[in-house]
Amino acid sequence: MQQRGWLIAISIIVGILLVCVALPFGTLLLMLAIGSGDSLPASADRVWQERVISGSGNNRVVVIDVAGVIGSSEADIFSSQITHQQLISQIRQARRDPNVKAVVIAVDSPGGGVVASSELHGEITALREAGKWVVISMGSVAASGGYYIATAGERIYAHPDTLTGSLGVIIATLNYEEAFEKLGLRQEVYKSGEFKDIGSPAREATPAEIAIIQAIGGEAYQGLVDVIVEGRQVPREEVLALADGRLYTGRQAFELNLIDELGDLEDAIDGAKDLAGLSDALVVRYGSAVTLRDLLVANLAKNLQPADPFGVRAVLRESGPRLEYRLLP
């Protein structure tokens, strides 16, 4: 009888271990099986569903949200934030739809990558070139790259307490040379050229390296100044005086001609209707239903993420210098 009890206990333990090992693989197989069908197109090609906000009729005003860091490749399926490629996909759908007469870009972002900001600016410019009226609505924050993309709009609205500005470029690197010394660690580098390990966190930057990185940042900065001069029709000297990295409130931005109107999202929607000559329109957002595959992907990604309770892994993650139009203390 005692032997039988031991067998039962061992069987239960083995069963639990098998479930713990097999479940992630089962989830992966199920995810792949669902993904192999044609029911869910790729993000760049998906057709977004319209979610009605207000109004009626055939004419559309589309609200597209630019939230979080510009250029982000990760998004929470339960939030309104979408990836950079999905955002571009939404803008292109609005551009192709003949019923869309105006687009409101709702910006709540501290900015982001230089390339990603430039891409979004180009997509918004293409909207206007396609005959769509484009209005920008600034939320809590529309700084740096968030302002960069706003310059492509026909009219910019901001709340009086919106934080905007931070006009400039930043390249931030981490240096843990002293921490390595205290731990008795040293990084050995074998390189083909003098500047191959530029931005290394394991040593102090040389004057030549600082000059190189500053030159790169300066070139991107001139690109930011160019789009502000063109988009806002402000003399270059005035833009240079404003673009020193400081933050402005919505009220200050209005006084400095960085925005056109003080108002919220509803004011921006009304302004878009007014520009398009619409007494009424169907105001919509784009979205897509959360599928079983989305849930499985999110669950699998969460399970595969290594634990990092103190944020050390994130800080020490290997990455090169990033060129950004971003509010980053």
Image: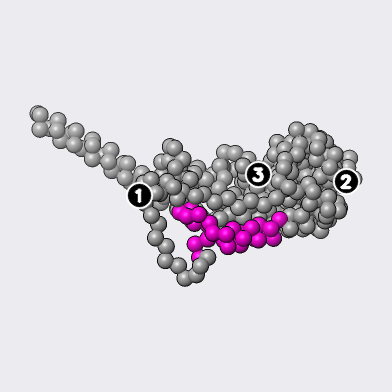
The residue carrying mark 3 is 327
Does dot 1 land on a helix, a strand or a loop?
Answer: loop
Q: Quadrant of residue 273?
A: top right
- Compared across the picture, whether 174 is left or right of 81 comes to left
Q: Quadrant of the C terminus?
A: top right
Q: Quadrant of residue 107?
A: top right
The answer to whether residue 191 is seen in the rendering is yes
The reply to whether callout 3 and callout 1 are in contact (CB within 8 Å) is no
Residue 306: percent from the left, percent from the top? 41, 44
The residue carrying mark 2 is 275
Closer-to-camera residue (40/242): 242
The residue carrying mark 1 is 184
Residue shown at the point (35%, 49%) measured from the top left: 184
- Compared across the picture, whether 313 is left or right of 67 comes to left
Mark 3 residue crowding within 10 angstroms, few (<14) / some (14–19) / many (20+): many
Residue 22: percent from the left, percent from the top? 33, 46
The answer to whether residue 52 is seen in the rendering is no
